[in-house]
Amino acid sequence: MLQDINLIRKELEGYEEIEFPYPLKPGIIVKYITVKDDEESFFTGGKFVKMGNETIYLTNGGPTWKVPIKVRDDECNIQYKSRFFIPSVEDVKSNEVIKFEKIIKAQQDIIEKMTETIKNDKIQLGKYISIITKLKNN
């Protein structure tokens, strides 16, 4: 829990604020500002698990905890809206993107090897054709 604005700014470098509804993906880091014990504070958060009933659930590998998206009074009036931050889109490379990049690199290596093999086979084929042509002419 942080309240020093300079530390909060440093923590939020490379992060952008989101508003709900927002399609969060499981595992994405979520930092947030919310009210706790009648005091607004910044929390370094954790990995997103799920969302439900104006609440998001986070974890850091252990038990999950919930963070209210909106705090309401007994008459359902919104008293406070929590603020949420996720890594900037350009800073995020999902595991899926990394996996596909590895697959593409492996396929590109195979294509380059096959191209080299085809080139060598064409050279050999040319030599064999010239030998066969010489033998036919003799």
Image: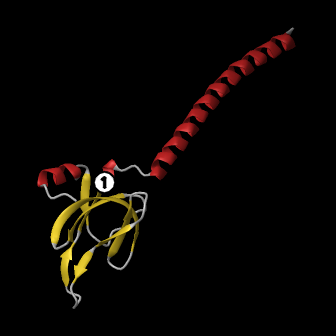
User: Which corner quadrant of the image does residue 122 belong to?
Assistant: top right
Q: Secondary structure at mark 1?
A: strand
For the point 32% across and 49% down, the residue is 90
Is 125 in front, or is 28?
Answer: 28
- The quadrant of the rendering that contains the C terminus is top right
User: Can you say whether 25 is above or below 81 in the image?
Assistant: above
Residue found at the very far top of the displayed protein: 138
Residue density around tag 1, few if under 14, some if 14–19, many if 20 or more, within 10 Å: some
Residue at 19% x, 57% y is 2
Q: Is residue 93 above or below residue 25?
A: above
Tag 1 residue: 87
Residue at position x 29%, y 71% in the image: 20
* Residue drawn at x 26%, y 68% as measured from the top left: 19
Above-or-below relation of 44 to 64: above
Q: Nearer the viewer, residue 36 or 85?
A: 36
Q: Is residue 24 visible?
A: no
Indicate the position of residue 103 as horizontal and vertical percent values.
Answer: 55, 43
Q: Is residue 110 left or right of residue 138?
A: left
Find residue 113 and report its horizontal and vertical position in percent.
Answer: 61, 29
Q: Position of residue 93 (x, y in %)?
A: 40, 49
- For badge 1, the amino acid type reads Pro
Q: Is residue 37 left or right of residue 123?
A: left
Note whether residue 61 is visible.
yes
